[in-house]
């Protein structure tokens, strides 16, 4: 195995892409337009940060790679569904994603809604098919991912996000929204690997839980900074879209400088948590730094 986590990213990405490919029906399977749209929404070039967090947490805890594939795939499918809906005219009304037309532009609105609808249960089907893990893992993962995806997780956060357009939120309210709309799936990525480690010490689970919460919020603040400072051809999304849609974001409410400061503070807090793991946390440390430093 290559020494640094960075050098293993390409193989992890290839691996999760192959598992996603195997989980999705062929594009030619009837109804073909729906399956084409589902594949388009998944294979249009994402960073795969959530699967990477699953594998990095697995490395940190010494969990076997094979059993990590199911949560890695399932959470990426939920993420892809969330992006397709997020871009719809009724939500953020974006026509560019990962440098390509969004699913409702490339296909049509109804197909985009249905493609996302179908990606969501596929994720749970993948979790239900988990083999070779400790008894009861599959059902625990279904519960974890369902909660992270639902009204007390990502979907709830999206609802708060839409209701907050044009409003002035306080820091706590804004971070609560971020914790749900973005943090919940990032948190589930890390906790999924914890669930697959039989007899994980409570202290380690608590530390990883706190690490996950900090980087989840930092991830969304960085996304907001990129919307303000990034260029469309690099970030692959229309730069400045948040301001145009009067989104309640960290930069809009507190300025870019304060956004950056808070991001760094959350990163530092996250890194401090990892100390009890020593060198085995190097992959998670690398990803935490990447989340705050990334250019897209
Ligand atoms: C974008 O997530 C949506 C947010 C939750 C901020 P990513 O930045 O992980 O998007 P992809 O998957 O790499 O395109
Ligand atoms: C995160 O927020 C959205 C999801 C939970 C899918 P954004 O609306 O800022 O994400 P982008 O910028 O469109 O990727
Ligand atoms: Mg949004
Ligand atoms: Mg959006
Ligand atoms: Mg954004």
Image: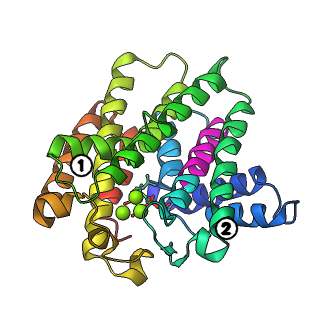
Check mark 1 vs ligand 1: CB closer than 8 Å? yes or no: no
Look at mark 2 in the image and give the residue it sits on.
Answer: 40
Residue 221, placed above or below residue 129: below
The residue drawn where x is 41% and y is 49% is 158
Q: Is residue 6 toward the left or the right of residue 15 in the image?
A: left
Secondary element type, mark 1: helix
* Position of residue 92 measured from the top left corner of the image (x, y, whole percent): 42, 64
Q: Magenta stretch?
A: 66-79
* Position of residue 199 measured from the top left corner of the image (x, y, whole percent): 50, 15
The residue drawn where x is 15% and y is 66% is 256
The residue drawn where x is 30% and y is 73% is 244
The magenta stretch spans residue 69: yes
The image quarter in which residue 284 lies: top left
Q: Is residue 256 toward the left or the right of residue 72 in the image?
A: left
Nearer the observer, 86 or 192:
86
The residue drawn where x is 51% and y is 42% is 54
Q: Quadrant of ligand 3?
A: bottom left
Residue 8, placed above or below residue 230: above
Look at mark 1 in the image and give the residue it sits on.
Answer: 267
Whichever of labels 2 and 1 marks the residue nearer the N terminus, that label is 2
């Amino acid at each position: 195995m290559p020494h640094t986590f960075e050098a293993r990213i390409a193989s992890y990405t290839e691996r999760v892409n192959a598992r996603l490919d195997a989980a999705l029906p062929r594009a030619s399977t009837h109804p073909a337009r729906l399956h084409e749209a589902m594949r388009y929404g998944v294979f249009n070039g994402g960073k795969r940060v959530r699967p990477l967090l699953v594998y990095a947490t697995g490395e940190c805890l010494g969990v076997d790679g094979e059993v990590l594939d199911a949560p890695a795939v399932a959470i990426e499918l939920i993420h892809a569904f969330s992006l397709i809906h997020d871009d719809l005219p009724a939500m953020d009304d974006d026509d560019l994603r990962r440098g390509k037309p969004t699913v409702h532009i490339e296909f049509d609105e109804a197909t985009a809604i249905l493609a996302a609808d179908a990606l969501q249960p596929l994720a749970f089907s993948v979790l239900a098919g988990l083999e070779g893990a400790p008894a009861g893992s599959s059902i625990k993962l279904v519960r974890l991912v369902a909660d992270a995806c639902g009204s007390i997780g990502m979907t709830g956060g999206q609802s708060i996000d839409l209701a907050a357009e044009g409003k002035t939120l306080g820091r706590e309210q804004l971070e609560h929204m971020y914790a749900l709309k973005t943090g919940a799936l990032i948190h589930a990525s890390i906790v999924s690997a914890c669930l697959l480690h039989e007899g994980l010490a409570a202290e380690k689970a608590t530390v990883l839980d706190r690490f996950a919460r900090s980087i989840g919020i930092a991830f969304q603040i960085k996304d907001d900074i990129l919307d303000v400072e990034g260029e469309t051809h690099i970030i692959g999304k229309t730069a400045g879209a948040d301001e145009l849609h009067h989104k309640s974001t960290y930069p809009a409410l507190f300025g870019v400088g304060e956004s950056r400061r808070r991001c760094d503070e959350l990163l530092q807090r996250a890194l401090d948590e990892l100390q009890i793991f020593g060198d085995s946390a190097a992959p998670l440390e690398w990803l935490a730094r990447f989340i705050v430093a990334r250019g897209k």
